[in-house]
Image: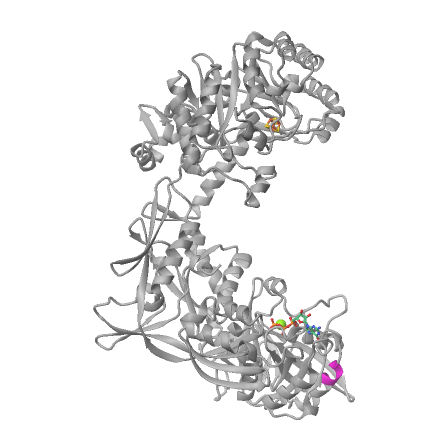
Amino acid sequence: MEHIRNFCIIAHIDHGKSTLADRLIQTTQTVSDREMQAQLLDDMDLERERGITIKSHAIQMYFPFEGKEYTFNLIDTPGHVDFSYEVSRSIAACEGALLVVDAAQGIEAQTISNLYLAMEHDLEVIPVLNKIDLPGAMIEEVSDQIIDLIGCEKEDIIHASAKEGIGITEILEAIVHRIPSPKGNPDEPLQAMIFDSVFNSYRGIEVFFRVFNGTLKKGDHVKFVNTGKTYGADEIGVLRLQHEPKKEISAGNVGYLISGIKVAKEVKVGDTITHVDNPTQRQVKGFEDVKPMVFAGIYPVETSEFEELRASMEKLQLNDASLVWEPETSAALGFGFRCGFLGMLHMEIVQERLEREFDMTVITTVPSVRFHAIKENGDVVKVSAPSELPESNTLSHVEEPYIRAQIITKSEFIGPVIALCMDKRGEIKNQVYLTSDRVELTFELPLAEIVFDFFDRLKTISRGYASLDYELIGYKKSTMVKLDIMLNGEGVDALSAVVHRDKAYEWGKRLCEKLRELLPRQMFEIAIQAAIGQKIIARETVKAMRKNVLAKCYGGDISRKRKLLEKQKKGKKRMRQVGNVEIPQEAFMAVLKLDQ
Amino acid sequence: MAGIYLHIPFCKQACHYCNFHFSTQLNYKSEMIAALCQEVEIRHGEISEPITSIYFGGGTPSLLAANELEAIFSALRSYFEIAPKAEITLEANPDDLDQEKLSMLKESGINRLSIGIQSFDDDSLKYCNRAHDSSEAASCLKLAKDAGFTNISADLMYALPGTDLDHWAKDLQRLLLFSPRHISLYGLTIEERTVFGKWQTLGKLDEVPEVKAADQYRLAIEVLSNAGYDHYEVSNFAKPGYHSRHNTSYWQGAPYLGIGPGAHSYNGKARGANISNNQTYMRAIRSDQLPIEWEQLSDLDKLNEYLFTGLRTNKGIDLNIIKEQFGKHLYDDYKALLSDFATRGLLTKTNNNIRLTSEGFMIADEITWRLFYDT
Ligand SMILES: Nc1nc2c(ncn2[C@@H]2O[C@H](COP(=O)(O)OP(=O)(O)OP(=O)(O)O)[C@@H](O)[C@H]2O)c(=O)[nH]1
Ligand code: SF4
Ligand SMILES: [Mg+2]
């Protein structure tokens, strides 16, 4: 056990975690040169295409050093704020962390938030100043920032270039020397923690775990403490690039378990695995439940595919424990699910994964945060869909979630950043200079205001020099109203939204305009109206189609034309009908495009 | 009833709106004619019944010289039985139609001319890069009559950029002075891979808004009906007895043979399309290969084709045919939709027949696909 090191790599987005992981994997000859490729661990198509890490990835390496053979369990983590939950899960399985900082960018918002996560769990932090090969690297300046932040010595910071392979041996040695070996007793009752799971269509669910105490042997009879379910450990092993079966995994080590689990709900990240006979009395302190930030309806494009969608979401949930949902019905869309997401990127990714991995095209409705509606009788109703808002005559008031946002930017952009946050109903709480021209601003803002386009606008006004991190701080009273959209006089529930009174007019107007662009013309005029209660606050019209007939079927090319018309018919199947108006799926996502 | 379509894939210059298959390279025209004749020979077995209509389309068939036309006719005559009263149409552009050309065409056996007038307005003609001007547009109609052509069809285009209802009324009036027996009206559609298509993406095209285009179409229907023309198909108008037989056979599901690159064929069961590339076409034919792709039609494909070709004509569709040939009860299957269309004045229904009104013709595509059956 003293030759095991469990660590994760944490950083702000794009600072080079996955590339550093590549170098460590390569230098320890964990994969052959033939198998090597850039950001090797980012194995989802979506990750490779977008060039970002979405999910944590664990891999085991061997490192012979000073005459001993060390076993490293590395977990690469995502940097995007939506996935900070993944970071906290990984951290719980480790004793140490490599904190990577881009030498050309310096400390940014997620550098700080991820560092605090690591410190909370008492991890040994090794600061790595990465990308020193870049001409814009500010080695001195960023080193000072790091020293300030962690309170370490200058010599503790390892200068590296993951791209050029500089500093890699130093890092490997520091892992051995500085990160403590795991503590625990292989002879005590089994106490292992589930930190991840993936679904494999051939083998069922693979559970990834870290053993804190005891030893898990192949064939053992095990129990998941939280769910109370028992299984046989059909196969266990370690997480080499290809999984490598083992006879046993004992205290301190990380491994995988295959036990024929088919039902997603049975695997809860954070749950404890123990033996059925001689169970542990110490349950691992689980993670906090994931807190979804954004809620939206997800509906199958073809109404008949509801059950298929449910099955797909269940499978997806297996390797995305942060996805939560419950069934929901909409008059406009039929049967679907109200889902909670960690943020908009997460929502986008879920939608894309459903499409790619499960071939399910879905309609996503207006995203919303979760409000608290306080009724006259004191009851609190959690409102994550506009339809859940109680009738106004029973409603006392509404509270909305607030966040504390940390924004790090260059001092020249302070003015515009503050103006933006004010416009978003924010309040500035603090302003700290990290260096003479880098400043950390703290705001309290309604979560609803940053969900949509906040980050893009922040990037724009700061010409890219701003990073954002946030956490939920609680609820505050707000004057929220329900805004409804009507098409030819009929309400479309899936287009309703709960918005702040001061923003309702603007919202209604822009949504009506957007819908006018997105609704196909029909044989009659379509009136689009936005209303608060009985009051119409905006209106647009889609003119009736006046002419739609191809003039000429030339030279008898009749099949081409038939196919054109058949295509239109197919398109209609993907639309929803409210009253006599046909609504294409994009229209339900119109809100997301309000700023474009 | 059976037809032959011959595609003459050459034009003097490319009109800015046109995405038909043609080349402006005329130097290998005679080789192409030889290939067409050879295709006639290769495929003669495909149709055994007498040919009731022959149609030279393009491209610009009026570019054909006397010997070329003669070569094609002699190939056709040696391999097919051409009905004595067959309709033999040739598409022509005004700039080609001088006295000499016209008498040559007449002598060769062409008995119907379809002339691409498009407009009598010089600005419009120039804007579209047509090869003729307004005076040629007018003179060719007169010369054609003088040459003894009685069955003349003229094409006009509406909704050309920069035109308004007045322009259009004037164009119609000028055309009516020559009282052609048949008129085809084509609303400008902007196609990809044309100059107009490019201008449209660049935002440089002064398109006539749909509502205005609809007004132009509506006006034409009114003017031509008053002048005694029968609006027998979405884009076609004819004096009694002068419907285009060739086109009508397309709509009635009669077999036709399409000769030439990009030409289409139908044999009652499958639709064929020749490759739309002159060189590949000629190469294939030279080595006795047919560069054609066939697509078998299912019963429902045929039904959908029947619906859309039928609804484009003033005869409409016959519910008995749909029941007997395809086993479908259109009226029951689309009851609510049909009565909705009827109350909107888009179609009329009598016993066993459904036909579109003039207003229905305007959005015929939109109505038709809604009545399609899933294939
Ligand atoms: N010049 C230079 N570029 C680097 C270095 N390390 C990483 N990069 C580049 O930085 C970009 C981001 O690298 P990744 O390794 O994907 O960063 P990451 O931190 O894993 O990103 P997320 O997982 O999305 O948070 C890629 O284009 C890398 O090629 C380095 O040392 N020098
Ligand atoms: S419109 Fe006729 S003449 Fe003009 S390019 Fe097209 S085929 Fe040729
Ligand atoms: Mg990464």
Residue situated in front as seen by the camera: A266 or A523: A523
Span of residues in magenta: A167-172
Q: Residue at (59%, 85%) from the top-left corner?
A: A436
**How far from the left and from the top, in percent, is residue A375?**
24, 74
Which residue occupies the extreme right position in the image? Answer: A67
**How far from the left and from the top, in percent, is residue A372?**
32, 74
Number of numbered discs visible in the structure rendering: 0
Give residue B36's quadrant in the image: top right
**Ligand 1 positioned in quadrant:** bottom right
Q: Compared with residue A24, is residue B280 higher up or lower down, i.e. above or below?
A: above
Residue situated in front as seen by the camera: A561 or B33: B33
Q: Is residue B286 magenta?
A: no
Q: Compared with residue B374, is residue A588 higher up or lower down, i.e. above or below?
A: below
Give the prevailing secondary structure in the magenta stretch: helix
Residue A318 visible at all:
no
Residue A122 visible at all:
yes
